[in-house]
Image (cartoon, helix red, strand yellow):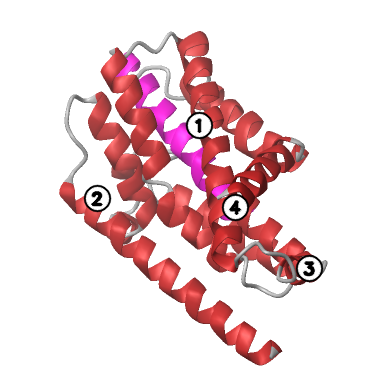
């Protein structure tokens, strides 16, 4: 446990020192939020609800991107630089290594969520009840687990540039088809049909339901759980094969 906590603390420090994380996970989501609520979409029937809706979309967008890109690319970098091989000679078990990665990333997500929520309060005066703020924050944090598992899966790639390109493509594709940049209703019907079975839509929809006074739908929970198990199983399978080839 001591080794796990030390590794987790190290992960948190490394993430905050990474300008890539600060730019893509904090700065860019706030730019999107300001543009889509103060430049475009300024005549919505219920502007206050739209401001809150899009705030949750941007918070989910930020955490999803950090899970997929920051975690995945860092895992590839560490393996190509030989760091993961070096760690295998230490008492730190492989399971604790990956768990500390995910725990450290989740701890940073708490900061990201609070930062974006506070920015929404300042920029547009978003007002929610204390329970809605807390429940939305907890949902965005816990429901990000499938994307953390996806980040671990991307981390099994052999090249950093490949992992970077693939993670960017997946990240942006999920954001668009998940309705995080625009309401699902304005997307083509085919994209709507496909998007509602992808994890990003279920992730965002849970947060949107909370600000409307509803609980997240069981369907969304089931879809996110299924993707979590799928990504974890694939990551374990691929890494076991890589270890077998190495030996």
Q: Which disc is residue 220 wearing? A: 2
Q: What element does badge 4 sit on?
A: helix
Quarter of the image for residue 72 reads bottom right
Give the vertical position of 198 relative to 119 (above or below).
Answer: below
- Tag 2 near tag 3, CB within 8 Å: no
Measuring from the top left, give residue 205's x and y in whole percent. Answer: 29, 41
For the residues labelled 3 and 4, the Cα–Cα distance comes to 16 Å
Q: Label 1's element?
A: helix
For the residues carrying marks 3 and 4, which lies nearer the camera in this image? 3
Dot 1 surroundings within 10 Å: few (below 14), some, or many (20 or more)? some
**In terms of depth relative to the viewer, which is nearer, 25 or 179?**
25
Q: Is residue 25 left or right of residue 179?
A: right
Question: On the rendered image, what quadrant is the C terminus found in?
Answer: bottom right
Q: Which residues are magenta?
A: 45-69
The answer to whether mark 2 and mark 4 are in CB contact below 8 A is no
- Callout 1–callout 3 Cβ contact below 8 Å: no
Report the predominant secondary structure element of the magenta stretch.
helix
Characterize the local packing of mark 3: few (<14), some (14-19) or many (20 or more) Cα atoms within 10 angstroms.
few
Identified at 34% across, 23% down, the residue is 134
Disc on the earlier residue, 2 or 3: 3
Residue to which mark 1 is pinned:
110
Residue depicted at 31% across the width and 34% down the height: 207
In front: label 2 or label 3: 3
Q: Nearer the viewer, mark 2 or mark 4?
A: 4
Q: Is residue 88 left or right of residue 194?
A: right
The label number, if any, that marks residue 86 in the structure image: 3
Q: Residue at x 67, y 64 (%)?
A: 91
């Amino acid at each position: 446990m001591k080794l796990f906590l030390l590794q987790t603390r190290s992960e948190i420090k490394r993430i905050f020192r990474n300008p890539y994380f600060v730019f893509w996970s904090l700065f860019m989501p706030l730019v999107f939020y300001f543009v889509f609520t103060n430049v475009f979409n300024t005549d919505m029937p219920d502007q206050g609800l739209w401001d809150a809706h899009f705030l949750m979309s941007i918070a989910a967008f930020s955490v999803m991107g950090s899970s997929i890109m920051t975690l995945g690319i860092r895992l590839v970098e560490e393996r190509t630089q030989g760091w993961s091989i070096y760690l295998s000679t230490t008492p730190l078990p492989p399971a604790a290594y990956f768990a500390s990665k995910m725990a450290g990333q989740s701890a940073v997500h708490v900061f990201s969520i609070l930062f974006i929520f506070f920015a929404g309060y300042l920029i547009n005066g978003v007002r929610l009840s204390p329970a809605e703020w807390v429940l939305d924050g907890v949902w965005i944090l816990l429901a990000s687990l499938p994307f953390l598992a996806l980040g671990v899966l991307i981390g099994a790639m052999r090249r950093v540039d490949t992992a970077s390109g693939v993670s960017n493509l997946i990240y942006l594709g999920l954001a668009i088809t998940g309705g995080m940049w625009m309401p699902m209703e304005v997307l083509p019907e085919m994209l709507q049909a496909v998007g509602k079975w992808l994890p990003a839509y279920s992730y965002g929809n849970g947060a949107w339901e909370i600000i409307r006074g509803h609980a997240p739908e069981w369907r969304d929970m089931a879809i996110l759980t299924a993707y979590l198990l799928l990504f974890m199983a694939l990551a374990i399978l691929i890494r076991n094969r890589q270890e077998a080839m190495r030996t």
